[in-house]
């Protein structure tokens, strides 16, 4: 009986891992993923500029502005892409990205 329970647990874990990590993304989801990566890169650049300003005291306004411009560009690309998305999972992913972008832009209101 214990072996059967362990077998069921292992199968369930295997299914969850496969569905979450191994299932390939659709073409639309891949396009959203590219924008997610661009957004994450811009956020990384923004935080790096903040750290540089804090450590060295140098003016990194241009670096901050560049990162913000990258985020705004991603937002524009996302809006264009969202109009073309047909997959529900891609739309959900795009909505999550849009929310993240909006939160970021609201949070940096004093940098604009």
Image: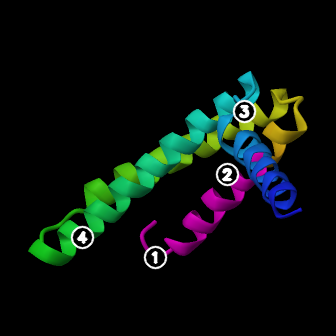
> Between marks 4 and 3, how big is the CA–CA gap?
37 Å
Tell which tag, 2 or 3, sits nearer the viewer: 3
Residue highlighted by disc 1: 110
Residue highlighted by disc 4: 51
* Quadrant of res 9: bottom right
> If you read the primary sequence from the N terminus, does the residue marked by circle 4 or circle 3 appear first?
3
Crowding near the residue tagged with mark 2, few <14, some 14–19, many ≥20 C-alpha atoms within 10 Å: many
Question: With 6 as the anchor, is 21 left or right in this view?
Answer: left
> If you read the primary sequence from the N terminus, does the residue marked by circle 2 or circle 3 appear first?
3
> If you read the primary sequence from the N terminus, does the residue marked by circle 2 or circle 4 appear first?
4
Q: Which residue lies furthest to the top in this view?
A: 27
Question: With 39 as the anchor, is 97 left or right in this view?
Answer: right
> Between marks 2 and 4, how big is the CA–CA gap?
24 Å
Query: Element type at marker 3?
Result: loop
Residue at 36% from the left image edge and 59% from the top image edge: 46
Depicted 9 relative to depicted 21: above or below = below
Query: Element type at marker 1?
Result: loop
Magenta range is 93-112
Mark 2 and mark 4 residues within 8 Å of each other at the beta carbon: no
Residue highlighted by disc 2: 97
């Amino acid at each position: 009986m214990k072996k059967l329970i362990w077998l069921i647990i292992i199968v369930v874990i295997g299914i969850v891992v496969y569905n979450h990590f191994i299932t390939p993304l659709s073409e639309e989801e891949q396009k959203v993923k590219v924008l997610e990566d661009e957004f994450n890169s811009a956020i990384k650049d923004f935080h790096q500029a903040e750290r540089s300003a804090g450590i060295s005291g140098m003016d990194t306004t241009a670096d901050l502005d560049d990162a913000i411009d990258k985020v705004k560009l991603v937002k524009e690309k996302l809006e264009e892409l969202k109009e073309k998305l047909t997959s529900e999972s891609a739309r959900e992913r795009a909505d999550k990205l849009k929310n993240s972008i909006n939160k970021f832009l609201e949070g940096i209101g004093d940098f604009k």
